[in-house]
């Protein structure tokens, strides 16, 4: 808290122009022409204050408006002022959004995820703030995006420097905010894995605060996370490779000792008596030098133990899961598995036949040349190209309108004397 001196009039009596910043309360000059006012600035460590804080600190509306006009202060948001000019640093932007929302409020959604550290801070985008459901504050695009919650007091945690929503609520909120059901699944699994969220906390959050949409899809994703799929890539492998092609269920997050350290393999089939490891390497994480060195040591240790290894990235699993499934099945059959790969919908659309893991193929019903939903919109031919009298190839014809004018309806048609279309052909 610092003092500010405001002189409302000038005077020739300079002896009364005291600049003592430690004056405890307002006092007038002896001459009566100069009113010298001192007061305490109620600004926080970020240099911000709300109008309520300014008033409680003894600042009148005329005074703070004079500071803004003189460009000593700046008006940041509704009822929020900064005691400096220029761009606001990130912490000041977050604090300004909380002051705009009023008490109580908490950072939430992507902003809370950035503060927790499992999402990188973004340069653009609004500050997301959650308030109680009965709060009257409104969003201020593109700077502040407000959300309301009936369970606000259960999901808010008071931390320095600013309050935010708990990790489990932040993960679920971000998943619910996704535009599609598939993206919601991937977001839930990916962020829960990045945040190191315990399975129990995620399941508890899903039970006590039901998602407002994608409920069934998010419950399935939470169950997959509980089974060991702790990243979006591992979830894609589980759903699009393993389940879609009827591969045997794998073990996940299997511990192995390498150089005196315990490391975890993404997917293994040791419970079937098959020494096969499927490693799912995300580019962003596994490109880190220390992680890349650890992966090489793990590869060498697996080779020395005679384990078969397959490594896939996001492009492999997301763009071509069928090829991944058949490669995994080929190694499983080589090691003694006797099951059969089931062709998924993508296999039939892309190839038109079932491809077995032993290399044999059985013909399936060919896929249509256009989506099934579009078939009803395609008109069947009304008449053959030949045999219908009155058709003149290439002639542009029309249908009689109400005003006696001719309207074109396409090429290769001829109208009857009443103006109706007789036939259409390509």
Image: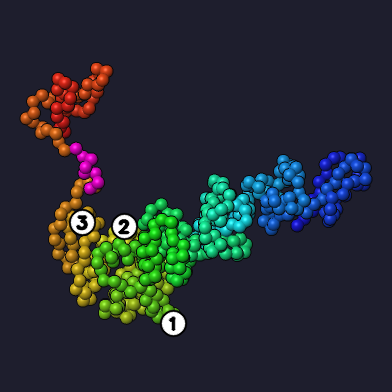
In the rendered image, residue 388 lying in the magenta stretch gets the answer: no
Determine the residue positioned at 36% across, 67% down.
224
Q: Which residues are magenta?
A: 372-379
Give the mark, 1 or 3, whose residue is nearer the N terminus: 1
| The one of 290 and 195 positioned closer to us in this rendering | 195
Residue 163 at what x, y percent from top left? 59, 61
Determine the residue positioned at 42% across, 54% down.
178
Where does label 1 land, which residue?
260
- Image quarter of residue 30: top right
- Image quarter of residue 276: bottom left
Determine the residue positioned at 14% across, 34% down.
382
Residue 190 at what x, y percent from top left? 42, 63
Give left or right: position of 399 versus 83.
Answer: left
Give the mark, 3 or 2, whose residue is nearer the N terminus: 2
How crowded pointer 1 is (Cα within 10 Å; few <14, some 14-19, many 20+) is rated as: few
Work out how far the residue at label 3 is from the one at label 2, CA to CA, in angstroms: 15 Å
Q: Nearer the viewer, mark 2 or mark 1?
A: 2
How crowded pointer 2 is (Cα within 10 Å; few <14, some 14-19, many 20+) is rated as: few
Where does label 3 land, which residue?
348
Q: Up-down: is 398 above or below 262?
A: above
Work out how far the residue at label 1 is from the one at label 3, CA to CA, in angstroms: 47 Å
SS for callout 3 = helix
**Coloring scheme used:** rainbow
- Viewer can see residue 355: yes
Q: Nearer the viewer, mark 3 or mark 2?
A: 3
Give the overall secondary structure of the magenta segment. helix
In the rendered image, residue 376 lying in the magenta stretch gets the answer: yes
Q: Identify the residue at the far left of this view.
A: 387
């Amino acid at each position: 808290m610092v003092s500010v001196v405001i002189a409302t009039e000038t005077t020739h009596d300079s002896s009364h122009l005291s600049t003592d910043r430690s004056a405890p309360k307002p006092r007038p000059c002896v001459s009566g022409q100069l009113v010298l006012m001192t007061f305490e600035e109620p600004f926080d460590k970020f240099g911000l204050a709300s109008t309520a804080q300014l008033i409680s600190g003894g600042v009148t509306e005329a005074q703070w408006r004079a500071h803004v006009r003189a460009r000593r202060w700046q008006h940041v948001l509704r009822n929020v002022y900064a005691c400096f000019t220029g761009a606001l640093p990130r912490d000041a932007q977050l604090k300004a959004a909380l002051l705009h929302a009023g008490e109580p409020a908490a950072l939430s959604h992507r902003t809370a995820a950035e503060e927790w550290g499992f999402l990188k801070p973004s340069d653009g985008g609004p500050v997301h703030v959650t308030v109680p459901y009965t709060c009257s504050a409104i969003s201020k695009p593109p700077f502040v995006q407000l959300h309301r919650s009936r369970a606000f007091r259960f999901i808010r945690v008071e931390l320095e420097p600013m309050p935010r929503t708990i990790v489990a609520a932040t993960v679920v909120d971000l998943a619910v905010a996704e535009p599609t059901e598939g993206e919601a699944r991937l977001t839930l699994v990916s962020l829960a894995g990045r945040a190191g969220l315990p399975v129990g906390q995620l399941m508890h959050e899903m039970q006590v605060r039901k998602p407002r949409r994608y409920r069934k899809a998010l419950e399935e994703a939470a169950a997959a996370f509980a089974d060991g799929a702790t990243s979006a890539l591992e979830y894609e492998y589980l759903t699009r490779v393993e389940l879609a092609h009827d591969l045997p269920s794998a073990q996940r997050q299997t511990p192995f000792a390498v150089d005196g350290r315990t490391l975890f393999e993404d997917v293994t089939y040791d419970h079937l008596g098959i020494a096969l490891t499927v490693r799912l390497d995300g580019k962003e994480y596994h490109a880190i030098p220390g992680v890349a060195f650890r992966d090489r040591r793990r590869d060498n240790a697996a080779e020395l133990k005679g384990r078969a290894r397959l490594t896939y990235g996001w492009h492999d699993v997301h763009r071509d899961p069928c090829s991944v499934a058949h490669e995994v099945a080929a190694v499983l059959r080589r090691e003694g598995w006797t099951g059969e790969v089931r062709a998924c919908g993508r296999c039939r659309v892309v190839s038109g036949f079932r491809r077995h893991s032993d290399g044999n193929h059985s013909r399936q019903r060919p896929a249509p040349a256009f989506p099934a939903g579009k078939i009803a919109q395609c008109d069947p031919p009304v008449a053959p190209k030949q045999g219908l009298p009155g058709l003149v190839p290439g002639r542009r014809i029309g249908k009689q309108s109400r005003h006696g004018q001719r309207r074109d309806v396409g090429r290769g048609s001829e109208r009857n004397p009443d103006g109706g279309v007789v036939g259409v052909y390509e």
